[in-house]
């Protein structure tokens, strides 16, 4: 399954980030809560940067593999389109990151307990769910944009992706104040989604064509594909 | 190489072996298989070998013969096609093995999480006599190392015993042994498992129903595994057996011993398969010399078996090209379907030499499958199950180990496609799994917990 190496890369990046955080925590003063919080922010930022670095590394790896496949295959094209790979890579990054963020919360949500009994927000679970969804989508979009930017060497796009990732992560720091964090994050998600869509070559016309395709004459399509078969031999 | 797997269960039984299904007839001609992987496993006697891989060279040689008369350019295109096929095959095989390994792990993790029985400490196996309830860390470490040494030596002794039996052709003994062990696994362990699951969910079941269910399950399992049956049913039974075995291991192995044993077994696997005097390697070579399927072994195979009827008429019509092909194939093992499939292939080759090679290769593609020893399944599941049972970071650690093991499997299959000979399946995956387990448990978990408590996302 092509999702797995990507997830592996994300895990490794997480591991390294936690290592850094752990070391920094141990080297510092345990009692100082502010310092700990600051270290946490530092750890989160480092983790974001490492994730993007690993995304880049994965891109390089994929490029090499793609070239290898292209040289081997008969017609010089690779069997998987690069867009698809970007999408899959972003998706798997998103899935593993989302799953890691949310699965313990889910497991706890089955058990007995009252949410927010110590004065925290009672909407913890719902907001976690929304945030995770936004994060997964964001990772997918970032994957598409990132790969496209690397292909076309538009480094400002890369910088923008990294900056938006940092921004999103930073917004979650505002968390019990949900209006300030959830709403901007969703706006960012929508914006990134639109950007990814445009990058992947979509447009308003494409959407219309896609919607109207379903009403087209299917038999015509089938005949066309029937014609195609001998060529694909 | 073949994979053997003996699993010995609890204190009472010495050893189990499981034989994979495939019909017991030896193919007349060894055909190439996808490589083998061997790994050792099991408590008392456990041999597992796994065989996977794709050998392309016979294909090459056969193709070469025919293209000799044609344009030499054809050969290079053939090689290219073969390389491409190797890669495609590799990907297909990877997927074919991921599903059963994933299923086995899911079953084990689900059971561990829900049924309390398997995480309670109710004693230990006689193979691990040293207890871990000692006050000092050093003592505990020493005890676990001693346990590991005992366990591994038991496994080595059993493997050597099996090799000796095989060398002296005591087939009946081996078959009886295998049947006895799978009998015990299918009946006794299923009974215990079912009992515990029913207890957990507080469902009542009367004895007549229980006897009916267990009898049917066990009898069908025996038939499927040792004789013939639908491929998917056989695969399902093998997965269930591996899960049961892994659960027993998880329950009865003390914690530190389990981790040290996992590490030691991957080292042993590496040595037993790759060293020239390793028992598994000797076993495989002996089987190759005798031109037999090493054993209706304890392997999980992912491809379809052709029926006997299909192969027979083909063998009659083999042409002269078959001869050279057989000679080339001599060094390889072939057991199970490739034999039938290849004989059919060779048959189609001789009468139609001008036929485009790609179609024949496509035929081969579908027929070749990948084999993984059941012991590999067991030890992967033991690792993930232990992670689920003992890690305090719960699901994160389990997931991380799961991903690590699958990536290790991927890499091993890749190496297999490159080296085209039997490879041990355990070392890479177990190493990754162990590394990820310990690092996730100690490093990532506090980080993620702290992040989650502030509801921060990275």
Image: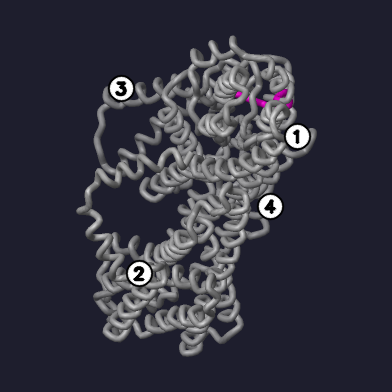
Query: To which chain does the residue with label 4 belong?
Result: B
Do the residues at discs 4 and 3 belong to one chain? Answer: yes
Q: Position of residue B391 (x, y in %)?
A: 49, 58
Say whether residue A15 is magenta.
no
Q: Chain of mark 3?
A: B
Whether residues under marks 3 and 1 lie with C-beta atoms below 8 angstroms apart, the answer is: no
**Residue tagged by mark 2?**
A132
Q: Secondary structure at mark 1?
A: loop
Q: Residue furthest right?
A: B276
The percent coordinates of residue B198 (x first, y second) are: 31, 38
Q: Is B254 placed above or below B163 here?
A: below
Q: Main secondary structure of the magenta part?
A: loop
Q: Which residues are magenta?
A: B329-335
Q: Nearer the viewer, mark 4 or mark 3?
A: 3
Mark 3 burial class by Cα count in 10 Å: few <14, some 14-19, many 20+: few
Label 1 and label 4: CA atoms lie apart by: 28 Å
Asked whether A105 or B350 is in front, the reply is B350
Q: Which residue is mark 4?
A: B142
Residue that mark 1 sits on? B278
Is there CB contact under 8 Å for labels 2 and 4? no
For label 4, the crowd category at 10 Å Cα-Cα, with few meaning under 14, some 14 to 19 and many 20 or more, is some
Q: Which residue is mark 3?
A: B212
Name the N-terminal-most of marks 3 and 1: 3
């Amino acid at each position: 399954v092509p999702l797995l190496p990507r997830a592996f890369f994300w895990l490794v990046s997480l591991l390294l980030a936690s290592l850094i955080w752990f070391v920094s925590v141990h080297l510092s003063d345990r009692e100082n809560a502010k310092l700990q919080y600051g270290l946490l922010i530092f750890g989160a930022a480092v983790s974001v940067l490492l994730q993007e670095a690993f995304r880049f590394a994965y891109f390089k790896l994929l490029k090499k593999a793609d070239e290898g496949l292209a040289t081997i295959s008969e017609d010089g094209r690779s069997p998987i389109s690069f867009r698809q790979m970007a999408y899959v890579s972003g998706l798997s990054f998103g899935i593993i990151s989302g799953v890691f963020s949310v699965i313990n919360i889910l497991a706890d949500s089955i058990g007995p307990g009252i949410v927010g009994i110590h004065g925290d927000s009672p909407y913890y679970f719902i907001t976690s769910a929304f945030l995770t969804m936004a994060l997964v989508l964001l990772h997918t979009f970032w994957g598409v944009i990132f790969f496209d930017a690397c292909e076309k060497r538009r480094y400002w796009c890369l910088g923008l992706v990294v900056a938006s990732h940092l921004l999103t992560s930073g917004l979650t720091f505002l968390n019990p104040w949900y209006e300030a964090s959830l709403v901007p994050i969703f706006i960012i998600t929508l914006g990134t989604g639109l950007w990814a869509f445009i990058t992947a070559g979509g447009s308003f016309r494409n959407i219309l064509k896609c919607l109207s395709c379903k009403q087209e004459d299917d038999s015509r399509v089938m005949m066309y594909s029937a014609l195609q078969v001998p060529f694909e031999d | 190489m073949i994979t053997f797997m003996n699993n010995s269960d609890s204190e009472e039984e010495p050893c189990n072996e499981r034989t994979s299904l495939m019909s017991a007839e030896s193919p007349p001609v060894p055909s190439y298989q996808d490589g083998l992987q061997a790994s050792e496993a099991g408590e008392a006697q456990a041999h597992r070998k796994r065989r996977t891989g794709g050998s392309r060279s016979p294909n090459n040689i056969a193709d070469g013969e025919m293209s000799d008369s044609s344009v030499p350019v054809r050969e290079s295109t053939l090689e290219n096609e073969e390389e491409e096929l190797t890669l495609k095959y590799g990907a297909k095989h990877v997927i074919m093995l991921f599903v059963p390994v994933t299923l086995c792990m899911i079953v084990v993790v689900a059971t561990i999480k829900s049924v309390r029985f398997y995480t309670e400490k109710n004693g230990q196996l006689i193979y691990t006599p040293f207890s871990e309830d000692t006050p000092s860390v050093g003592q505990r470490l020493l005890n676990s190392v001693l346990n590991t040494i005992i366990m591994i030596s038991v496994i080595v002794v059993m493997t050597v015993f099996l090799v000796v039996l095989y060398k002296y052709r005591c087939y009946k003994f081996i078959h009886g042994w295998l049947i006895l062990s799978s009998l015990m696994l299918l009946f006794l362990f299923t009974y215990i498992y079912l009992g515990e699951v029913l207890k957990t969910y507080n469902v009542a079941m009367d004895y007549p129903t229980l006897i009916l269910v267990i009898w049917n399950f066990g009898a069908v399992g025996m038939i499927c595994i040792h004789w013939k049956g639908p491929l998917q049913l056989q695969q399902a039974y093998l997965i269930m057996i591996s899960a049961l075995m892994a659960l027993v291991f998880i329950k009865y192995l003390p914690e530190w011993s389990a981790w040290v044993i996992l590490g030691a077994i991957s080292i042993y696997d590496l040595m037993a398969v790759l060293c020239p005097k390793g028992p598994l390697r000797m076993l495989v070579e002996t089987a190759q010399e005798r031109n037999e399927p090493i054993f209706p072994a304890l392997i999980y195979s992912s491809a379809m078996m052709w029926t006997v009827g299909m192969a027979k008429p083909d063998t009659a019509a083999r042409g002269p090209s078959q001869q050279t092909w057989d000679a080339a194939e001599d060094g390889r093992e072939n057991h199970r379907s490739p034999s039938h499939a290849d004989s059919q292939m060779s048959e189609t080759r001789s009468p139609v030499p001008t036929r485009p090679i790609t179609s024949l290769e496509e035929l081969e593609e579908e027929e070749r499958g990948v084999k993984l020893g059941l012991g590999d399944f067991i030890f992967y599941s033991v690792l993930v199950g232990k992670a689920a049972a003992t890690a305090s970071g719960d699901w994160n650690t389990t997931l991380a180990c799961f991903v690590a093991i699958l990536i290790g499997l991927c890499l091993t299959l890749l190496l297999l496609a490159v080296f085209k000979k039997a490879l041990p399946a355990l070392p890479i995956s177990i190493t990754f799994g162990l590394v990820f387990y310990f690092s996730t448990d100690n490093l990532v978990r506090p980080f993620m917990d702290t992040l989650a408590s502030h509801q921060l996302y990275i």
